[in-house]
């Protein structure tokens, strides 16, 4: 038995800032209701190993694309914990995959930092998306729901324009949506499967970035979601890992190319994060229910723990950063 990495050591779509503290963004840990969580309330400090649930879990698989409301435990996307400080005041952001998981956490964080936000998602995710829209509006910001399939180039072009028109501008694009399905044997990897993975993860990113950049002014930015899978690929995620490697390369290349327009391009590389993606065939059920146990934290990251990375890269504080990839892996790398 080789002692490399177990399949459950590797996340899949978005992932872990696990306990990392970002000085410029604040997470309200005082008074945050966390069921079953230990907390150092007296000092305002919390042990990052004990802040959130650790496996084993009792999650059931659900059909693609999955709903956050059907997860046990339910992911923390900052609904009660994220406190903004105006770092994105006056900005206009489009976030794909903004209904759940990391995209949901980023949408909530952006709104509480002062940005107006449009989210894209699949029609099947409408119930989760409407919760996010309500959180954005509760933060006093404009919220725009734009459902649709990113695998269609025409839709990506329409999406960028509609976000721009309805928000009153577009100066931040977060390419976060992704598709992943575990396939143990290469011989079972179909062309249809490859098409869905590459069109969702790579083609759509390029189509939407192209359409958005045409509408952006200098000072705008793009933040992509790559993955630790880009450089630590799991054997059952051949196509997904390949797309994440592509996203990393695209980020580094476009960051240099688009700088002439005054547009920065960076990415976040998550480790194992607890999101609906994990429950829809991204991993076998037995792996899902011990998800995150193989990283130093012994638990998966929660989406709220990685949202500050996106906020920082989108903010003017990162004006000298482009072509950068921020790893948030819970100690995996």
Image: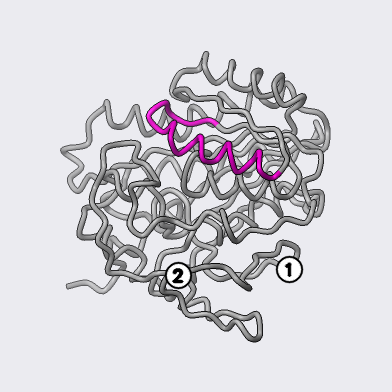
Give coordinates of residue 78: x percent, y percent.
57, 56
Q: Is residue 145 above or below residue 52?
A: above
Give coordinates of residue 191: x percent, y percent.
26, 27
Determine whether the residue tagged by mark 1 lies in a helix, strand or loop: loop
Which mark is first along the chain, 2 or 1? 1
Residue at point 76%, 26% (across, down): 169
Q: Which residues are magenta?
A: 120-139
Give 195 or 35, whichever is nearer the viewer: 35
Residue 23: which numbered mark, if any?
1
Identify the main secondary structure in magenta: helix
Task: Answer with left or right where residue 223 lies relative to residue 165.
Answer: left
Residue 52: which numbered mark, if any?
2
Is residue 125 a member of the stretch shown in magenta? yes
Residue at point 52%, 13% (across, down): 154
Is residue 141 a member of the stretch shown in magenta? no
Q: Mark 1 to mark 2: distance in Å?
A: 21 Å
The quadrant of the rendering that contains the N terminus is bottom left
């Amino acid at each position: 038995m080789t002692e490399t990495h177990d399949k459950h050591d590797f996340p899949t779509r978005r992932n872990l800032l696990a306990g990392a503290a970002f000085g410029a963004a604040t997470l309200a840990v005082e008074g945050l209701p966390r069921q079953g969580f230990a907390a150092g309330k007296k000092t305002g400090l919390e042990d990052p190993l004990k802040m959130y649930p650790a496996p084993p879990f009792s999650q059931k698989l659900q059909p693609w694309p999955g709903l956050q409301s059907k997860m046990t435990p339910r992911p923390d996307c900052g609904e009660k914990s994220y406190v903004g400080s105006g770092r994105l005041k006056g900005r206009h952001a489009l976030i794909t995959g903004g209904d759940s998981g990391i995209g949901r956490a980023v949408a909530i964080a952006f709104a509480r930092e002062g940005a107006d936000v449009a989210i894209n998602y699949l029609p099947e995710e409408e119930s989760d998306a409407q919760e996010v829209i309500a959180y954005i509006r509760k933060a006093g910001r404009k919220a725009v729901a734009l459902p649709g399939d990113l695998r269609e180039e025409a839709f990506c072009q329409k999406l960028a324009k509609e976000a721009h028109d309805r928000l009153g501008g577009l100066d931040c694009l977060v390419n976060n949506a992704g598709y992943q399905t575990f396939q143990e044997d290469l011989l079972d990897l179909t062309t249809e499967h490859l098409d869905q993975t590459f069109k969702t993860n790579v083609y759509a990113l390029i189509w939407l970035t192209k359409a958005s950049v045409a509408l952006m002014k200098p000072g705008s930015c793009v933040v992509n979601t790559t993955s630790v899978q880009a450089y630590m690929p799991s054997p059952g995620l051949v196509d997904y890992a390949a797309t994440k490697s592509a996203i990393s390369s695209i980020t580094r290349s476009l960051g240099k190319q688009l700088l002439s327009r005054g547009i920065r391009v960076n990415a976040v590389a998550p480790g194992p994060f607890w999101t609906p993606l994990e429950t829809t065939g991204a991993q076998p059920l037995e792996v899902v229910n011990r998800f995150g146990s193989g990283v130093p934290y012994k638990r998966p990251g929660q989406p709220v723990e990685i949202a500050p990375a996106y906020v920082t890269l989108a903010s003017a504080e990162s004006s000298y950063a482009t072509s950068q990839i921020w790893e948030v892996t819970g100690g995996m790398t």
